[in-house]
Image (spheres, grey):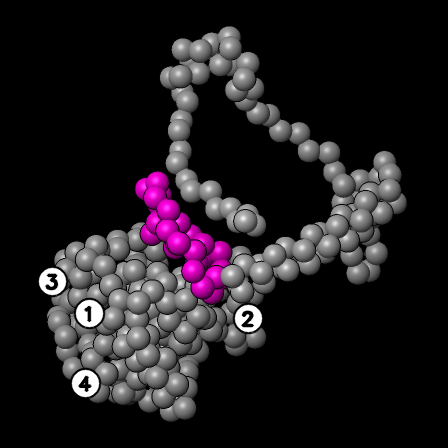
Amino acid sequence: MKKLISTLNLDKENWLQYRKHGIGGSDAGAVCGLNPYRTAMQVYYDKASDEIEDIDNEAMRQGRELEEYVARRFCEASGKKVRRANAMYYDEKNPFMLADVDRMIVGENAGLECKTASPFMADHWKDGNIPVSYQIQCYHYMAVCNADAWYIAVLIYGKEFKYHRIDRDDDIIANLIQIEKEFWNNHIIPKIIPAPDGSKTADLAIAERFKTSHGFTIPLAGFDERLRRRQELLEVMDHMEKEKRQIDQELKIYLGDAETAENEHYRVSWKNISRSSLDEKRLKAEEPELYEKYRRITTSRRFTVKAA
C-alpha cells in the first residue's frame, strides 16, 4: 500500500480526477458484474473519458453526511477505535487498484466501511447477510491495504444499526485482482468498451453515451447469428406472453365482480383505478397558444430490427 494523494484538503473536482487513475472500491463490484446499480460499461466510460463524472443525489449526500455518525455508532457497539486515513492509496504491485477508505481500525490491520440503507433494503442485511457488491468492495480494500480483515457498518434509517467483520480470503482476493487486472488491461488501456450484460442499467448507460444519431448508415456486419437468435427469442417470448395473458383472463373470469381472491399461497386483485390525463388533441385545437406555451419536446432514439 502506498499513498497516491492526501485527501485532507483535496477539493471534489481533483478527487474525482484522481479516481480516474484506477479502479476504486466502489467500482470493484461493477467490474465483477455484481453491482445491481452500476455496470462495467459505466466504469469504463468514467475511466476512459476526459469528462469528470460527478454523480450525486439525496441518498448519496445523506450517506456522506452520516458517515461520521455510523463510525461513532460502530465504536460504541464494538468497543474499537477508528481513525481517518485522509489519503487515497494504491497497490504497488497493481497500481490501477485504488483505495479511498472511510476509516482504519486503531490497533488492528483492518479498516471500516460505513454504509446507510433505506428500510426497504433491510432484507438485504438480515440474518448476517451483506450485499455482494459491498463484500467485493471490502475485499478490494483488503487487497490494496494488505489488511487482515475489513469491518462494514450499516445504519438502516429509523430501524437499526449493525456491523460485521469480513476476514481476509486470499482466494477471493486473488480472483478479484485478476478480474480487475483484465478489465484495466483489456478495456481501459486499449479503450475497448466492455461487452453489455443485458441489464437495464446497461440500457441506461448506452442511452446516455449515445444520445443522438447523425443520419448516416453503416454496413451491418457480424450480427446475423445474433439477430437470428433474437428472432427466436421474440417468438418464445410471444408464446409465453400469450400463455400468461390466458392465465390472467381465466383469473379475471373467476373473479367476476369481486375485487380480490386469496388462499394460503396467493392473493389476486382486480381493482378499480382512476387516473386523470390531459386531452392534448382537444387542448391543441381549442387553446393553441396555451398548448404551444407548455408543450415540451424530448428527443430519444428508437431502436428497431426488421428482416431484409
Q: Earlier in the sequence, mark 3 or mark 1?
A: 3
Residue 299, quarter of the rendered image = top left
CA gap between label 3 and label 4 equals: 24 Å
Q: Position of residue 131 (x, y in %)?
A: 47, 71
Which residue is denoted by mark 1 in the rendering?
A: 21
Q: Earlier in the sequence, mark 2 or mark 1?
A: 1
For this orientation, the residue located farthest to the bottom is 170
Which residue is denoted by mark 4 in the rendering?
A: 92
Q: Is residue 23 above or below residue 222?
A: below
Q: Amino acid at mark 3?
A: Asn
Q: Earlier in the sequence, mark 1 or mark 4?
A: 1
Q: Is residue 164 above or below residue 211?
A: below
Question: Which region shows up in magenta?
Answer: 197-223
Q: Amino acid at mark 4?
A: Glu
Q: Nearer the viewer, residue 308 or 115?
A: 308
CA gap between label 1 and label 4 equals: 14 Å
Q: Which label number is shown at residue 9?
A: 3
Q: Amino acid at mark 1?
A: His
CA gap between label 2 and label 1 equals: 36 Å
Q: Which residue lies at the image location 51% right of the left edge and 14% below the top edge?
A: 283
